[in-house]
Image (spheres, grey):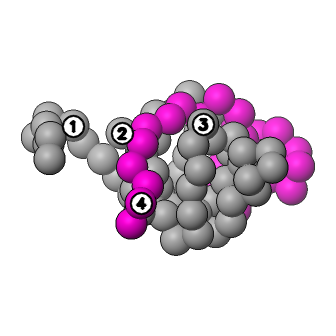
Amino acid sequence: MDSNPEVKTKKVGLVSHYFGTIGVAAIKLTDALKVGDRVKFVGATTDFEDMIASMQIDHVPVQKAAAGEEVGVRVREKVRDGDRVYVI
């Protein structure tokens, strides 16, 4: 395992659903998230980094979202319900 003590991560939510046909993850936020953030998805079989290029709440584009909101973000790999999401 390659771990870098200089890299700081902060948990911002959990994947609540993955829409495979359109490659979008629904994320229930436990902390703030904004367009441009680099995130890491981690789960039993999931481990990759991505950048938040766009985000929507109820099909409306937003630039940022707060804890308690559920957002949709396009992801480059498959994620699974319950995967953890960290800002890096």
Amino acid type at mark 3: Arg
Instruction: Name the residue located 53 percent from the left edge and 32 percent from the top edge.
Output: 51
* Residue at mark 4: 45
Looking at the rendered image, the disc whose residue lies closer to the viewer, 3 or 1, is 3
Sequence-first tag of 2 and 3: 3
**Vertical placement of residue 6 versus 42, above or below:** above
* Residue at mark 2: 88
Few, some or many C-alpha atoms within 10 Å of disc 3 (few <14, some 14-19, many ≥20)?
Answer: few
Few, some or many C-alpha atoms within 10 Å of disc 4 (few <14, some 14-19, many ≥20)?
Answer: few
Residues at badges 4 and 1 in contact (C-beta under 8 Å)?
no
Distance from label 4 to label 1 (Cα)? 21 Å
Instruction: Name the residue located 30 percent from the left edge and 47 percent from the top edge.
Output: 9
Sequence-first tag of 3 and 4: 4
Q: Quadrant of residue 4?
A: top left
* Residue 7: mark in rendering: 1
* Residue at mark 3: 76
